Image: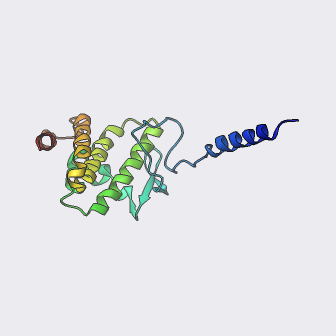
Amino acid sequence: MPSQKLISLFLILTLQFSANIVRCQAPCYLSSSFPLPRDVIAPPEVTCDNTNIFANIPDVIFNGLRFSQINFQTSGVAQGLTPLGYAIATFSAGNQNPEFIQTAGKLYTAVNAALRSRGERDILKQLKVVDFFIASQNDAIKGPDGKSGQLRNLKKVRKNCSKANCTGLELKTIKLKIKELETV
């Protein structure tokens, strides 16, 4: 017959390990086809609609705003802007209220995660330019505390710029802002 200490130890170990097994439902916009990189964190508070925006990705919603309302392809590229041009015109911290930029950031991050989870690379680089620019503006709103994040995200914008995503003048603007942040 097992001793009382052995039974207690068994129960403690069983409860300890079973408490760590928590199953979370994936956000509605993710598929399980491809794993996300560690630095892409899918915002769980973003919800989905029944319509698709592209690549079988549902329109995502947060704080009453839909991605389709701020989609760089339909709102920017269709108007002759590059993805970065649209991002600068629409999401610059000095031109918008912080809540709008934070909401846009959640939506773009959700679509970024959705594209990656499906292995969809065609639109991803364009979207990343906008997503990283928005992230840089969310960091800019934080003032001096957000400087390192703003610099990191602007460098990611620069890295993802190509002729299809950014004009030479837009890229120069980003490079100047990076230089300014590095010297301050």
Quadrant location of the C terminus in the rendered image: top left
**Relative image position of residue 51 (x, y in whole percent):** 47, 55
Q: Residue placed at 24% from the left, 43% from the top?
A: 148
Q: How is the image coloured?
A: rainbow
Report the quarter where the N terminus lies: top right
Residue drawn at (31%, 46%) of the image: 131
Q: Position of residue 153 (x, y in %)?
A: 26, 42
Residue 159 x/y as whole percent: 24, 34
Q: Residue at x 77, y 39 (%)?
A: 5
Q: Residue at x 29, y 57 (%)?
A: 101
Relative horizontal placement of residue 96, taking residue 60 as reference (left or right)? left
Residue 38, quarter of the rendered image:
top left
| Along the viewing direction, whichever of 177 and 49 lies nearer the viewer | 177
Q: Position of residue 99 (x, y in %)?
A: 31, 62
Q: Quadrant of residue 63?
A: bottom left
The residue furthest right is 1
In the figure, is residue 9 to the left or right of 164? right
